[in-house]
Amino acid sequence: MKEIIDNLKIEFDNLLQNAGENYEELKVSFLGKKGKVTELMQNLRDIPGEQRRDAGIAINNFKQYVEAKLEEHAKKIEAQKLEREINSAERIDITVPTAEKVGSLHPITVVQKEVEEVFKSMGFMVEDGNEVETEFNNFDAVNVPRNHPARDMQDTFWLDNGEVLKTQTSAGQNRILRKYGAPCRVIFPGRCFRNESVDASHENTFFQLEGMMVGKDINVANLIYFMKTMLSKVLKRDLDVRLRPGFFPFTEPSFELDVTCPFCGGKGCQTCKQGGWIELCPCGMIHPEVLRMGGVDTTKYQGFAFGLGLTRLAMMKYNIKEIRLLNSGNLPFLSQTKTR
Ligand code: FA5
């Protein structure tokens, strides 16, 4: 029996060496129902009594040898296969710069940058604001004390800690007055939040761009000049502006600034509802109380402030009729501004 097993082992080793990926066949031919090891087992009964036990042990050892070798071989073949797949897979070199456009700036960002550039060229600084604001900054510091009816004009998202999601960029006025004092020229764009029902022209999350100019002898003519210059440059047309009386607790007098409709040039069209003007920017002379709360000496300084609806300006510039598209994450729509 020993001789038979030794010969079988040599045969098995040779076959295994050349089996490659076809080792399953070898397994069947040795361990299968009609395999060589199984046959040896079946022949055991022909072996005389005392030699049978030793032969059984030898056959079993050989069987374990065959099984172990086949398993080892299978693992080796699988590892080789995996390595081949990895090597043949498409290689990605992350250091190669992309030739294609990877994205585009959001239309509001494009307009914000343009407005910033115009104001910077006129000596204004650009400041960042908070999205979560104190009740004081959002309301009290702009002359809207508790129980003032103007608080109802802006449906506020209140936080559990008593702070608010900024309802208006005017919330930055007090901080900026305290930071820079008078004289100063600053604009501060930012995201605002109001708990109002959403429709084609109202969002609960939108952008404003606030501006303040404080100095000696600042008056409404300065306000008109800066707004007209900025809007004509951003909308790339020579536009007229007009002021109508408005009301804001933080400006006195307060105005609604209208601009000649950029779509019809003031002749009247669907967008301006045939009126020839579009309401664009509330503004006014900063209320002395607001200046005082910001630490400014009102016997020496005055100033104007405005709160441009940046989202609405972007809609006007790109003729977007539906405000909800701007927060939609709709790539075909957003990529139309074609800017990086
Ligand atoms: C204000 O928020 C004042 N803080 C503006 C201001 C600043 C006045 C400084 C005077 C001096 P109002 O609530 O009207 O004002 O909002 C200003 C602009 O924000 C609007 O003209 C409009 O363009 C935009 N806006 C307001 N609510 C929404 C909304 N729900 N969705 C989109 N844009 C809005």
Image: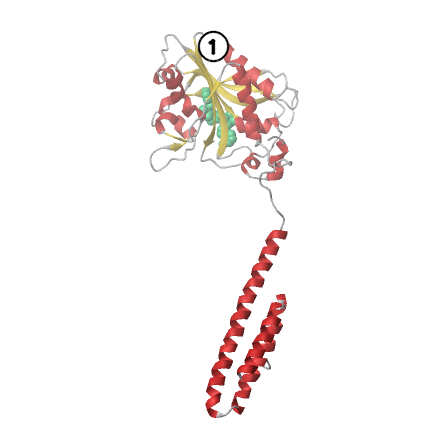
Query: Circle 1 sits on which residue?
Result: 219
- Comparing 6 with 175, the one in front is 6
Up-down: is 57 above or below 117?
below
Q: Residues within 10 Å of mark 1 (few under 14, many from 20)?
A: some
> Who's the residue at 37% across and 25% down the image?
137
Task: Please tell me whether mark 1 sits on a helix, a strand or a loop.
Answer: loop
Q: Nearer the viewer, residue 160 or 77?
A: 77
Please state which of residues 272 and 207 is positioned toward the viewer in this rendering.
207
At a point 55% along the width and 29% down the height, the residue shown is 108
Screen quadrant of the C terminus = top right
Q: Is residue 155 left or right of residue 257?
A: left
Examine the image and state in which quarter residue 163 appears: top left
Tell me what residue is drawn at x 65 percent, y 25 percent.
269
Question: Can residue 28 be seen by looking at this rendering?
Answer: yes
The one of 329 and 199 positioned closer to us in this rendering: 329
Instruction: Pinpoint residue 7: horizontal percent, then vertical percent.
Output: 58, 78
Total marks drawn?
1
Q: Is residue 57 left or right of residue 81?
A: left
- Give residue 130's position: percent from left, percent from top: 42, 29
Image quarter where the N terminus lies is: bottom right
The colour scheme used to paint the residues is secondary structure
Q: Position of residue 139 (x, y in %)?
A: 38, 26
Mark 1 Cβ inside 8 Å of ligand 1? no
Q: Is residue 97 left or right of residue 303?
A: right
Q: Residue at x 47, y 82 (%)?
A: 57
Residue 32 makes an appearance in the image: no
Left or right of residue 286, residue 31 in this image: right
Amino acid type of the residue tagged 1 in the rendering: Asn
Q: Where is residue 172 shown, x and y percent of the image?
A: 41, 24
Q: Quadrant of residue 101?
A: top right
Above or below, 93 relative to 11: above
